[in-house]
Amino acid sequence: MNIPFVSFKPLEKELDTYIHAAFERVYTNSWYIDGNEGKVFEEAFAEYCGTRYCVGCGNGLDALILSLKALKISTGDEVLVPSNTYIATALAVTYVGAKPVFVEPDIRTYNIDPVNIIEKITSKTKAIIPVHLYGQPCDMEKIVDIAQKYNLYVIEDCAQAHGATYNGQKVGSFSNIAGFSFYPGKNLGALGDAGAIVTNDEKLAKMVRALGNYGSDYKYHHIYKGNNSRLDELQAAFLSAKLPLLDRINIERRSIAKRYMNEIKNTKLILPYVLDGVEPVWHIFSIRSVNRDELAAYLFEAGIGTNKHYPIPIHLQEAYKELNIGQGALPIAEQISATQLSLPMYYGMTEEQINYIIDKLNAF
Ligand SMILES: *Cc1c(COP(=O)(O)O)cnc(C)c1O
């Protein structure tokens, strides 16, 4: 059997008529930037997240950069980020001139450990960016408490967690402002690059909109030196076509995760740990093994696609050599990088495929 790490085909088949209708609508209107499709999607997505405002932008990285800029975080400031995340989280901080300070995760949940946050706070710390990694919400109650106590902003990186809940509340609604990515492979994906912020703060929403539109509050009137990062009408229309399916997509991912959790029984493998009160959306189903590379090769031989998230921690990337954080400095992130493997997890996986994966993992 051949099972890819991810396939969009089953979802595309189901969405076919809606996607074509979305394209027709935009093309017939001949209006491609800053129009009704954007507005409609932003309203629907804000409502979905339980926030007052949503502002679309070009991608998930820009959503974080625009959030940091709107909070006036810049040179000389420090921002706490998890030591194990996609590099975008740290790059956003670097791009506004601030310094990313890495906080080690909880080895069970792979999310930023509130216990490790406090020791990294200095007089320069301005914000914390918790990342709901692999689709599992961080321990937001503790993080928000620390932020309030030390007067820090919280920016949620929700790029992997559309629709995930913590104590019944959706991610994106716990912080000053939150960034989403609609990269095609995310739980809610566009047909290209797209992103958004959500917030309850009207001033921040307006600032992000202006900053992503050449710093303009109305046509040819510029209040900031902004850049160009907008959600275009086509991607907004595609996202509106897909949003009604998001809950079903997440429910299906949960049922696949449940089968993996209940039926993978192999002492060589470490399965995910889910915090109490949390409903993950399983952007990635992540297992760990000290024999990770051997396991990946074995699954490859069996026709099962896997991936690593992420094989090199940010502090050991060439791009961040200026930080001078050597091997061994962030042992939990390094341990995850060395042992982590992501299993196939997507809408439309068949029972037969799931059975096969579970059988192969149990025979390893
Ligand atoms: C995908 C991702 C981003 C960046 O999103 P893009 O749309 O690719 O720019 C940021 N943070 C995390 C955690 C991500 O997974």
Image: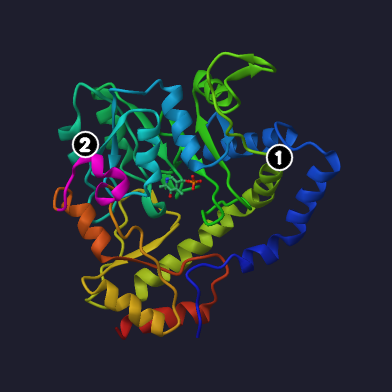
Residue 58 percent coordinates (x, y): 57, 39
At 42% from the left and 52% from the top, the residue drawn is 135
Q: Which mark is residue 233?
A: 1
Contact? badges 1 and 2 (CB < 8 Å): no
Q: How busy is the neighbourhood of tag 2: few (under 14 within 10 Å), some, or many (20 plus)?
A: many
Residue 289 percent coordinates (x, y): 24, 70
Number of callouts = 2
The residue to which callout 2 is attached is: 117
Amino acid type assigned to the residue bearing label 1 in the image: Glu
Residue 266 percent coordinates (x, y): 26, 78
At 27% from the left and 72% from the top, the residue drawn is 292
At 46% from the left and 23% from the top, the residue drawn is 70
Foreground tag (1 vs 2): 1
Q: Which residues lie in the magenta part?
A: 315-327
Q: How busy is the neighbourhood of tag 1: few (under 14 within 10 Å), some, or many (20 plus)?
A: many
Q: Is residue 223 magenta?
A: no
